[in-house]
Amino acid sequence: MTQFAARDFHPFEAGGNRYLYLVPSAGVVRLDRASDAVLSTVAQEPGSVGELTSRLSDRFAADEVASAVEELLHIQAIGVAAEPRKRMLKVLPSSAVPLQTMVLNVTSKCNLACTYCYEYGEDRVVDEEAAEMPRFLDEETARQSVDFMFEEAGPNPVVNLTFFGGETLLNFPVLKTTLAYARERGDALGKKVQFSLTTNATLLKPEIVQWLIDNEVGVTVSIDGPKEMQDRFRVFHNGKGSYEVVLPKIRDLLQRHTAKPIGARVTLTRQNLDIIGIYRHLSEEVGFQQVGFAPVTTANGRDYAIEDGENGYDLMLQQFQALAWEFLEYTVAGRRHAFSNVTETLEEIHKGVSKAYPCGAGVGLVGVATNGDVGLCHRFAGSDEHRLGSVGEGIDVEKQREFLDRNHLANKTDCHTCWARPLCAGGCYHEAHTRYGSTEHANLHYCEWIRAWTHTCLEVYGELAERAPHVLERIGN
Amino acid sequence: MKHIQSINGKARRIEAHLAEEAGAASAGNHDVVGLEGGGPPQPNLPLGCTFLFSPGWETDSTGGTAGLCSPVERDLFDCHLGCFWPAQVPDQLNHAPDWIGKCATAQKDWRNIDLVFP
């Protein structure tokens, strides 16, 4: 008799029901009592249909067990015990991937001097003095970048152009002309361009806000929270805190720019981990519609690095979880909740994303430096080692292919037994580069964290499926 | 499925795929479903080597038999490249990589195709 054994999946519970997150397909299914019992029994010890039937005979009829086995086999939650497990396939994109997003660094200069900044701080990738990188993007290079973007976008009807820095608004004149040129070229080519920009908000002025509104530019504000947190790291070059400067400007922006959700993007450090406090302040007191958190990217041992254990990653996780459960209650009650870390993960779970690469860097997304060099993403823009081409020459397809070959999940053997790999795929290249000196390395320092957080998001997803299935249909729209 | 309910988009796609496979299996169509309709109506294109630039030896590009493989010499070696029904040719990956190296155009140079002995 054929023996069956459990394959890769991650179980979780919601509303008293057993769910599975299937690996690597990333399907989410709900089991009934029979299939749950069969799976639990097989997971304890492999068995044939006959053996399983006899082990479960007090609870389920033989035909129930047999049909449950068949269905579990179909979704590959179980497999034939004697057959080897499927090896991870390494399938590279067969042809050039059309560009979806270009992140354009309009300046490498900033009027703040945040200690932890990856662009200027101790862990910077680009050595600006050696590279002689222009501090500002000039109009000519900006136009070339826009032409490059449309060229590389191929058949994509929509492209995203994100302005990044440095502080983007230091180069407002070029922002303006670049956006106008991109709009004009987009109209001529029949393509829609979606614009967005990241800023520290120090230079927002009423006329700039009006320009953002008129041009439907999505805005992300880098901000760390209430005054004492914002002013700890986000300081001007003279060491003065920026909170008092940015707050009135942000309030003006939020009040008037209502067509697009304005996001707050918080950098978490060892000293700045009161996530719930920050969330309350930014969403409820200041009024951001989206608040997202990211731990600071840093080499190990820096003063601001988040440490392992109860004062570091554990503390962060507990608060993320508390906000995720709060998100669930708000959503079920039909109320809006601004915690965007959970919505982003839920969207990926809902689609069933199964990644070979952690993000779109180098495949569909590129970062352009002020000298026109094309890099993996904005964090690598200007780094010679991670250069994929230039806006004048286009993307070097050979280099891109080589990058995709080297960084495929199939090479990250550390990840091959992890159930969270369809969503994580080893984590941020830049984080890995900073921590381990290579984009190819899996980010092993936060594996436990990622698994715990993904598990929470799966539970929230399951609860939504139980309590508010109509909401799932809206996710991603 | 009776015991397992698909919740997210990927699970539904898996389920649809399984249902499609089961349907095809019960109808006795296993492999070549793509050629046999089933699915939305397709334009009626001739299949095989006749529908592009290489005329074939079953039907010509108009669907008749008047213009079969012209020049006829092409089917000495062209079918294995351009046709969905590969002709038997020497192992050009390992054993005889240059066997058509001297044959630039079939009609003129077909005599230059190498003789290959396995």
Image (cartoon, rainbow, N blue to C red):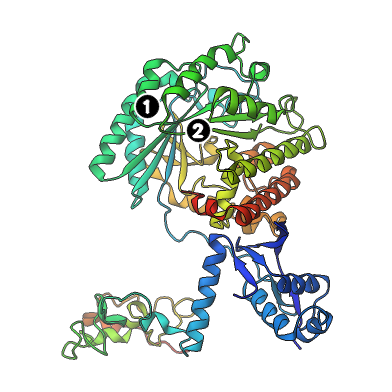
**Mark linked to residue A382:** 2
Q: Which picture quadrant has residue A54?
A: bottom right
Write down the residue under mark 1.
A213
Residue A434 locus on image (x, y percent): 66, 36
Amino acid identity at mark 2: Gly
Q: Extreme front residue here?
A: A333
Residue A326 locus on image (x, y percent): 66, 40
Sequence-first tag of 2 and 1: 1
| Front-lying residue, A284 or A106 | A284
Q: Which picture quadrant has residue A122?
A: top right
Q: Is residue B46 above or below residue A445?
A: below
Q: Secondary structure at mark 1?
A: helix
Q: Chain of mark 1?
A: A
User: How many marks are shown on the rendered structure?
Assistant: 2
Q: Chain of mark 2?
A: A
Which one is closest to the eye, mark 2 or mark 1? 1
